[in-house]
């Protein structure tokens, strides 16, 4: 082979490599591939944050009522679930800003831009006239709901690492979980640190892992899972752990507490779903689904009064939605018909265009008779099923997408 | 298969090295780079050996080209005979390079996967970390999320100051320059022109790519290039002759930037 041919071959190979790497880079930077839709709802409207817009969707038709911003920007995307109030919708973007929007029109009311350029992955929380939100640089802020201005006297609190969860407000205390492996209790007025778990130093919990999900607060107990394969029950009064429950893999999902059955239901990334006694952490039942459980289980009931939990399994290969009988931990006897692509009690969901199962990482949401599923892939970011028949009602396909 | 054989081992090695090396991701990349270079040493050694052999054949090849310039078929036949006689495989320099590409792509994917800056990436990572690790190794879950910051860099993002891309260009160019012999004689043959063109465009091209990739990969690239240079020099194959393009290794700006040296008589005339 001559030198010339050899160099041409090398150039061709390097060119291919360059395209491959550049392609990988572009894929890595495709923001629509960075997370799943953030979904929230009022009594009459569904709000979806996904890709370049936040959409208000009519639950009757599945069509968008408005979108924000009007024109998509290549550099702006949304994933954080909107926080909904009557006066303002608050949503953070994947850049550095929180937006206050008019729920009726989607018009921009205010913008809060952080100084560090940190993304908002977790949703904001509205409590009275205040908004609390955490960003990926670990900063927690308190804003005035009406104006978007920082609350006077509430200096931002900064955790050691990212905050991907939604703050939980309980009276005068704001609880925040962080990837820095801590739960923080902050003063709701000043954002000063009241306490943290694990406490710094001895007797801290050296085995604590990163905490991604929003904790579930019930009767003064914080329930949360960690990447150390454990579910925790943390007493906020005594600031001590009541019990921990070992799992097979990381816990990403927020737990669901059903006060009627008294069961705490959660899942791990191995697809194990388990119901525990919230007082003791004792296992009541366990069920295996096909993929990682990321979104929180959602409580519902069938027409015969059976209480069920919808579990989304983020798989692209098998079944991806389960309805479990909360009492028994078995597949609920849902009144499905065979017209849709079901197996008998769980759903092999169709995207409408093809039968490839979609990945559902977002927690399902129920509004009226609709069961809403946010999809990470597929033709639509949002699917609506009739929760009584589990039949496909509509798929939201943003105009112009 | 790709995940099982290349990507997952790299991801988990990066995580373990990160835990062992004081939670320093740059050190983890350095160590893994050194290990990869050691593993690839037989290939790179063969590649460099082949390259040197090809260099030694150049004068004879040139003679053949002149002799059979009007008979391409004869030229090809004689060229192949010369290769056979010298025991040189013309693909010997290219194949090892090709084999290294999956490693490079795997390293790139391992860096982006292990840094996991977004929810989808972190979920993806969760499916690829080894769960049953020996107790003397750090457990991946204890390490995640990794600290991707080092000096001014966020290793998951391109270098905002462009320092690493510049280093990538310089070290890649330097490595190519030291590996490539100067063009002999004053004749501006096509192969020499091609060679000079490659020496300049390839580093620039790779530098351009590194502008868009996570800076962690640029760290790998720079370190890998430096190790390659050291390895080449340690093998005694490197010389200032290649760098300056002169027969005696003396400094020449023309040679440094890849222009051919003027013929000896011309040099002599200029000196006199």
Image (tube, coloured by chain):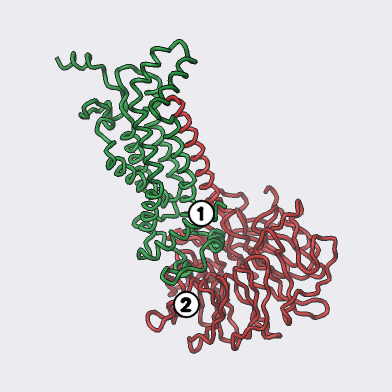
Chain colours: A red, B green
Q: Is residue A41 visible?
A: no
Q: Nearer the viewer, residue B157 or B262?
A: B262
Residue at mark 2: chain: A
What residue did someone put label 2 on?
Answer: A184
Name the residue: 38% across, 53% down: B35
Helix, strand or loop at label 2? It is: strand
Helix, strand or loop at label 1? It is: helix
Q: Is residue B151 left or right of residue A107?
A: left
Up-down relation of residue B199 to residue A35 (above or below): above
Q: Residue furthest front?
A: B85
Residue A66, quarter of the rendered image? bottom right
Q: Residue furthest left?
A: B272
Assign the N terminus of chain A to one quadrant of the image: top left
Q: Residues within 10 Å of mark 1 (few under 14, many from 20)?
A: many
* Residue B211, position as x, y percentages in the image: 43, 44
Residue at mark 1: chain: B
* Disc 2 to disc 1, C-alpha distance: 36 Å
**Residue B7 — which label?**
1
Q: Residues within 10 Å of mark 2 (few under 14, many from 20)?
A: many
Q: Is residue A190 left or right of residue A261?
A: left
Name the residue: 54% across, 71% down: A131
Name the residue: 33% across, 40% down: B170
Q: Is residue A251 visible?
A: yes
Up-down relation of residue A323 to residue B183 (above or below): below
* Residue B91, position as x, y percentages in the image: 45, 32
* Residue A329, position as x, y percentages in the image: 71, 78
Q: Nearer the viewer, residue B210 or A147?
A: B210
């Amino acid at each position: 082979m001559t030198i010339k041919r050899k160099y041409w071959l090398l150039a061709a190979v390097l060119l291919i490599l360059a395209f491959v790497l550049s392609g990988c880079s572009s894929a890595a930077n495709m923001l629509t591939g960075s997370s799943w839709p953030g979904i929230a709802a009022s009594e009459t409207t569904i709000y979806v944050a996904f890709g370049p817009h936040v959409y208000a969707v009519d639950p009757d038709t599945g069509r968008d009522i408005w979108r924000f911003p009007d024109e998509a920007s290549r550099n702006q995307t949304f994933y954080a679930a909107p926080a909904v109030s009557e006066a303002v919708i608050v949503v953070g973007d994947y850049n550095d800003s929180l937006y206050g929007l008019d729920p009726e029109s989607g018009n921009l009311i205010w913008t809060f831009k952080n100084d560090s350029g940190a993304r908002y992955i977790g949703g904001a929380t509205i409590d009275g006239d205040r908004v609390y939100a955490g960003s990926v640089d670990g900063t927690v802020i308190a804003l005035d709901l009406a104006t978007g201005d920082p609350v006077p006297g509430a200096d931002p609190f900064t955790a050691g690492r990212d905050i991907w969860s939604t703050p939980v407000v309980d009276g005068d205390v704001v609880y925040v979980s962080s990837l820095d492996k801590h739960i923080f209790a902050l003063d709701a007025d000043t954002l000063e640190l009241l306490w943290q778990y694990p406490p710094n130093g001895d007797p801290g919990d050296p085995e604590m892992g990163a905490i991604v999900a929003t904790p579930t607060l019930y009767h003064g107990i914080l329930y949360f899972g960690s990447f150390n394969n454990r579910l925790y029950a943390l007493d906020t009064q005594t600031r001590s752990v009541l019990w921990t429950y070992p799992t097979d893999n990381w816990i990403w999902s927020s737990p669901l507490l059903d006060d009627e059955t008294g069961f705490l239901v959660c899942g791990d990334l191995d697809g194990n779903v388990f119901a525990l006694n919230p007082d003791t952490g004792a296992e009541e039942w366990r069920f295996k689904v096909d993929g990682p459980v990321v979104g929180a289980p959602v409580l519902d009931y069938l027409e015969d009064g059976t209480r069920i939990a919808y579990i989304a399994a983020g798989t692209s290969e098998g079944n991806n939605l389960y309805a479990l009988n909360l009492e028994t931990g078995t597949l609920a006897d849902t009144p499905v018909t065979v017209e849709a692509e079901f197996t008998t009690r769980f759903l092999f969901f169709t995207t409408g265009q093809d039968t490839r199962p979609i990945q559902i990482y977002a927690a399902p949401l129920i509004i009226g008779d609709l069961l809403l599923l946010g999809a990470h892939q597929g033709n639509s970011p949002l699917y609506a099923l009739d929760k009584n028949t589990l039949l496909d009602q509509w798929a939201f396909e943003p105009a112009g997408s | 298969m790709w995940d099982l054989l290349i990507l997952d081992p790299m991801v988990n090695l990066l995580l373990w090295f990160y835990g062992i090396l004081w939670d320093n991701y740059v050190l983890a990349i350095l160590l893994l780079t050194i290990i990869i270079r050691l593993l690839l040493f037989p290939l790179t050694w063969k590649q460099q050996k082949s390259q040197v052999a090809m260099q030694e054949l150049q004068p004879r090849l040139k003679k053949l080209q002149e002799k059979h310039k009007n008979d391409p078929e004869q030229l090809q036949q004689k060229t192949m005979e010369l290769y056979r006689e010298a025991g040189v495989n013309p693909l010997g320099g290219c194949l090892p390079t090709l084999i290294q590409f999956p490693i490079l792509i795997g390293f790139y994917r391992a860096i982006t996967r292990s840094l996991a800056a977004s929810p989808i990436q972190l979920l993806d990572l969760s499916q690829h970390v080894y769960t049953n690790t020996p107790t003397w190794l750090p457990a991946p879950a204890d390490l995640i999320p990794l600290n991707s910051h080092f000096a001014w860099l966020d290793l998951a993002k391109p270098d905002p100051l462009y320092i690493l891309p510049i280093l990538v260009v310089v070290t890649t160019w330097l490595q190519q320059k030291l590996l490539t012999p100067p063009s002999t004689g004053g004749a501006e043959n096509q192969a020499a022109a091609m060679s000079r063109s490659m020496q300049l465009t390839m580093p620039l091209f790779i530098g351009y790519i590194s502008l868009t990739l996570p800076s962690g990969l640029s760290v790998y690239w720079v370190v890998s290039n430096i190790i390659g240079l050291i390895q080449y020099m340690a093998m005694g194959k490197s010389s200032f002759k290649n760098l300056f393009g002169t027969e005696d290794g003396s400094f020449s700006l023309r040679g440094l930037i890849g222009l051919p040296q003027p013929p000896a008589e011309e040099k002599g005339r200029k000196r006199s």
